[in-house]
Image (tube, rainbow, N blue to C red):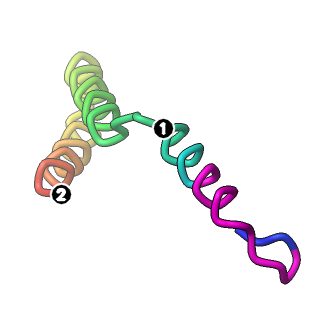
Amino acid sequence: MKLGNKPLIRSAQSWIKRVEREHQPKVDYHSELRDWVQHVIVEAEKNNDFKKKDQFLTLLKDLDAA
């Protein structure tokens, strides 16, 4: 991070890096997406929507492979 063309002093760079590390989100989007896909599959089964169920089963397999 630079202000204009002037490089920041070392203590400011250190502080910025520490703040950026502390505020990184700790959300596991993969597991949330996987849970949502499983929920959609269950709902599709309840509604006898087999085309939708098959599509989301394919997506779930892709998520598990990733």
Is 5 contained in the magenta span?
Answer: yes
Does dot 2 land on a helix, a strand or a loop?
A: loop
Crowd rating for badge 1 (residues with CA inside 10 Å; few <14, some 14–19, many 20+) = few
On the image, the x and y values in percent for residue 2 come to: 76, 72
> Quick one: quadrant of the C terminus?
bottom left
**What x and y, as percent, mark residue 23?**
55, 38
Disc ID at residue 53: none
| Label placed on residue 25 | 1
Q: Amino acid at mark 2?
A: Ala
Q: Is residue 7 above or below residue 54?
A: below
Foreground tag (1 vs 2):
1
Q: Nearer the viewer, residue 18 or 34?
A: 18
- In the image, which residues are magenta? 4-16
Q: Give the mark, 1 or 2, whose residue is nearer the N terminus.
A: 1
Does the residue at mark 1 contact the one at mark 2 (Cβ under 8 Å)? no
Q: What residue is disc 2 on?
A: 66
Residue 63: image x %, image y %? 20, 50
Above-or-below relation of 9 to 58: below
Residue depicted at x 23% and y 50%: 59
Q: Residues within 10 Å of mark 2 (few under 14, many from 20)?
A: few
Residue extending farthest to the right is 4
In-front residue for pair 50/59: 59
What amino acid does circle 1 point to?
A: Pro
Q: Answer with the quarter of the image where residue 34 lies.
A: top left
Whole-number angstrom distance, CA of label 1 to CA of label 2: 21 Å
- Number of callouts in the render? 2
Q: Residue at x 84, y 83 (%)?
A: 5
Residue located 27% across and 28% down the image: 35
Tell me what residue is drawn at x 53 percent, y 47 percent.
18
The reply, left or right, for residue 23 in relation to residue 11 is left
Quadrant where the N terminus is found in the figure: bottom right
